Image (cartoon, helix red, strand yellow):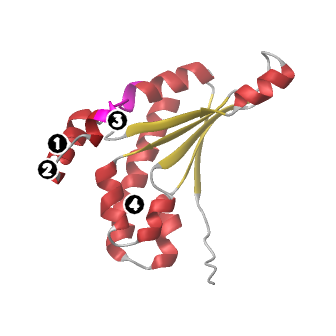
Amino acid sequence: MATRQIQVQRFTVVCSKSFEDVVAQMDAAIAHPDMKGLLTARTYSDLEKAIRDQVGPSGLMEFARFDLGAILRLERGAEGPKILRLVVGNPLIMKRMVEHVPDAGSYAPVTILIDGREDGVHVSYDRMASLLAPYGNAVASAVARDLDAKVESLITAAAT
């Protein structure tokens, strides 16, 4: 049995835009692919082409979304908090990390958390490079830093 200590860096932008505007900006920049089409690829080159054809302007696609605030709004009414977790990524980027650090599969695709608070809408992301740092793999860390730059650019654009 082994335990590894991991320190996470969280990137957060707080903005005065509405929750709905931030989500709309995210939706415009992230692809919403036909996952069945990706899964029917017969070769790696077919899969690679399908992914490249379907990623959004950010180079990322949505895998899932969870309306975490829905439960709180059921309890508190329509004025309850708005909290949305987006699971986004790019399978080609994930592949480049997990082939060097298999544990990267625990973190990719990544989570972007959008939540409305009294001081504004918070958009947060746990940096992949910080999650992979303890593994000491230079190649995976370089890919992670590139992914961090993509996600942070996406968040900054959506929040400004």
Is 52 colored magenta in this rendering? no
Question: What is the distance, in whole Å, between disc 4 and disc 2 at their CAs?
Answer: 25 Å
Three-letter code, disc 4: Arg
Q: Mark 3 or 4 closer to N-term?
A: 3
The earlier-in-sequence mark between 4 and 1 is 1
Question: What kind of residue is marked 2?
Answer: Ser
Callout 4: few (<14), some (14-19), or many (20+) C-alpha neighbours within 10 Å?
some
Residue at 21% over, 39% down? 50
Residue type at tag 1: Lys
Residue under label 4: 145
Q: Amino acid at mark 3?
A: Met
Locate residue 43, reporting x and y percent. Answer: 15, 51
**Element class at badge 1:** helix
Q: Secondary structure at mark 2?
A: helix
Give the magenta range.
28-36
Say whether disc 4 or disc 2 marks the residue closer to the N-terminus. Answer: 2
Q: Which mark is residue 35?
A: 3
Identify the residue at horizontal 41%, vertical 70% (top origin): 102
